[in-house]
Image (tube, rainbow, N blue to C red):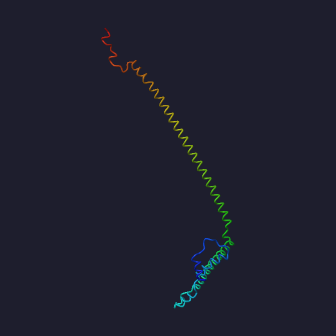
Amino acid sequence: MAHQDASMVCNPDYSSPFASVEDAVHRLLPYHVVSDYNSEEDDRILESDTTGDTKSRSQQWDNDVLGTVTKFNAMFEKQVGNFNMMLRKRAQGEFRSEERLMLDKALIQEEMEAFLKTKVEIESREKADKEAAQAQMQMAMAQGEQAQAELRSDANVYAASLPYEGNMDGLHGWNCSKRDEEPSEDSSE
């Protein structure tokens, strides 16, 4: 029987699914049989230990389970204590989560309204500043164009007066040389 179990463990049938619960038990039981330790082996280990510190596997398992249960029990007691403390504080009025939530929501809404109001004011100021800057720019451009037009008209008047003044010099005898004033001798004959 042990050889049969060892053979089934070494050559498992992993290609076909379990047909029933009985089939699953029949195919998986050899793994548990082979993996089971010999209690006589534990007895020999315990007898060979002269100090008495070595524990059998079952004693180690019992100690591990007891430690885990103790740890879970302490954690549960701590959680129960925290829950009872929170219930007492809530009854005294320290934890009013609904009221606190409503106050926080109202505070956030007020802050949002103040933010939006400030944002609108800033945008309107920026728009007014931009319009004022554009108006100043247009006024400066208009003044520049007006000054340019005045300069052009003054230049045209000055340019128009230059040739006329030159003819006047000739008519009045200004800027004339002596030759032009004195008749030549050749022309009198």
Q: Using the rendered view, name the quadrant where residue 186 is placed.
A: top left
The image position of residue 51, as x and y in percent, is 52, 90
Residue drawn at x 40%, y 22% is 166
The image position of residue 125, as x and y in percent, is 58, 48
Q: Is residue 158 above or below residue 47?
A: above
Q: Nearer the viewer, residue 40 or 92?
A: 40
The image position of residue 91, as x and y in percent, is 69, 72
Left or right: residue 144 compared with residue 4: left
Q: How many marks?
A: 0
Left or right: residue 175 compared with residue 161: left
Q: Nearer the viewer, residue 2 or 125?
A: 2
The image position of residue 56, as x and y in percent, is 57, 86
Residue found at the very far top of the displayed protein: 189
Q: Is residue 34 above or below residue 17?
A: below
* Quadrant (top left/top right/bottom left/bottom right) for the N terminus: bottom right
Residue found at the very far left of the displayed protein: 185
Residue drawn at x 61%, y 79% is 30
Q: Nearer the viewer, residue 41 or 87?
A: 41
